[in-house]
Image (cartoon, grey):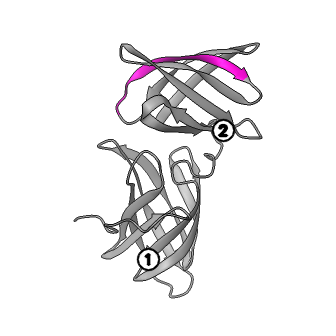
């Protein structure tokens, strides 16, 4: 679940609050119990109540978890990077300019990404478009001096692969141990 905003209050082990889903604008309530760095509880989605489990990061500024049948649910405090593997945050293997296994390291903080890849650096903005997390921005090659614009789209909520383009070139990515996306570039 991709959230824009979560507000939580804690009284002892009990936690209560609210959320807003960034992809569709839906709002709901959250309640649970925090024990040993793990928050387990329920959240409302429309008229239904579903379970979730979040494991806090060691610094307490982010969490990774699951939301019932929806799958992955992760996030971070305002101004903090998402946990590795959440959104665009972390390490990727990419196909860039006919080159496979081009390593990329991205930092994803709020609605911005920045980082490096096998040929240079990139930075951009992240937003939701038709229920997908999209990143658009600029890249620069420290090898050739080339530069341009890119567009990435995560293929699903699990944030394990993205499809994308840099000008007319395909640029897609996948997490370690996974295959390259079957369709690398975006349709124009």
Q: Is residue 107 above or below residue 96?
A: above
Q: Is residue 170 above or below residue 114?
A: below
| Residue 20 sits in quarter | top left
Range drawn in magenta: 24-34
Residue 62: assigned label: 2
- Residue 171 or residue 34, whichever sits in front: 34
Which residue is pictured at 44% across the width and 77% down the height?
Answer: 96
Q: Is residue 1 visible?
A: no
Which residue is pictured at 67% across the width and 18% down the height?
Answer: 33
- Residue 47 or residue 130, whichever sits in front: 47
Which residue is pictured at 56% across the width and 78% down the height?
Answer: 118
Instruction: Please provide percent x and percent y for residue 166.
Output: 37, 72
Viewport quadrant of the C terminus: bottom left
Instruction: Using the numbered discs, state the Cα–Cα distance from disc 1 to disc 2 in whole angstroms.
Output: 30 Å
Number of numbered callouts drawn: 2
| Residue 182 sits in quarter | bottom left
Would you say 31 lies left or right of 26 here? Answer: right
Marks 1 and 2 close (CB-CB < 8 Å): no
Instruction: Please provide percent x and percent y for residue 76.
Output: 62, 38
Instruction: Please provide percent x and percent y for residue 122.
Output: 52, 67
- Residue 8 or residue 138, whichever sits in front: 8
Badge 2 element: strand
Q: Is residue 32 magenta?
A: yes
Residue at mark 1: 96
Which residue is pictured at 71% across the width and 22% down the height?
Answer: 34
């Amino acid at each position: 679940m991709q959230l824009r905003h979560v507000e939580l209050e804690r009284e002892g082990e009990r936690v209560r609050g609210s959320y807003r889903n960034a992809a569709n604008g839906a709002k709901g309530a959250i309640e649970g119990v925090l024990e040993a760095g793990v928050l387990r509880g329920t959240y409302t989605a429309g008229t239904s109540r579903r379970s979730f489990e979040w494991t806090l990061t060691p610094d307490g500024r982010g969490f990774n978890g699951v939301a019932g049948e929806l799958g992955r649910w992760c996030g971070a405090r305002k101004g903090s990077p998402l946990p590795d593997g959440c959104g665009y945050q972390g390490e990727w293997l990419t196909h860039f300019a006919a080159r496979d296994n081009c390593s990329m390291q991205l930092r994803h903080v709020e609605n911005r990404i920045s980082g490096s890849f096998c040929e240079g650096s990139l930075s951009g903005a992240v937003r939701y478009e038709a229920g997908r997390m999209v990143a658009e921005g600029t890249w620069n090659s420290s090898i050739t001096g080339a530069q341009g614009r890119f567009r990435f789209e995560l293929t699903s909520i699990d944030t394990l692969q993205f499809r994308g383009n840099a000008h007319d070139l395909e640029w897609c990515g996948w997490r370690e141990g996974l295959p390259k996306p079957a369709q690398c570039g975006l349709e124009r």
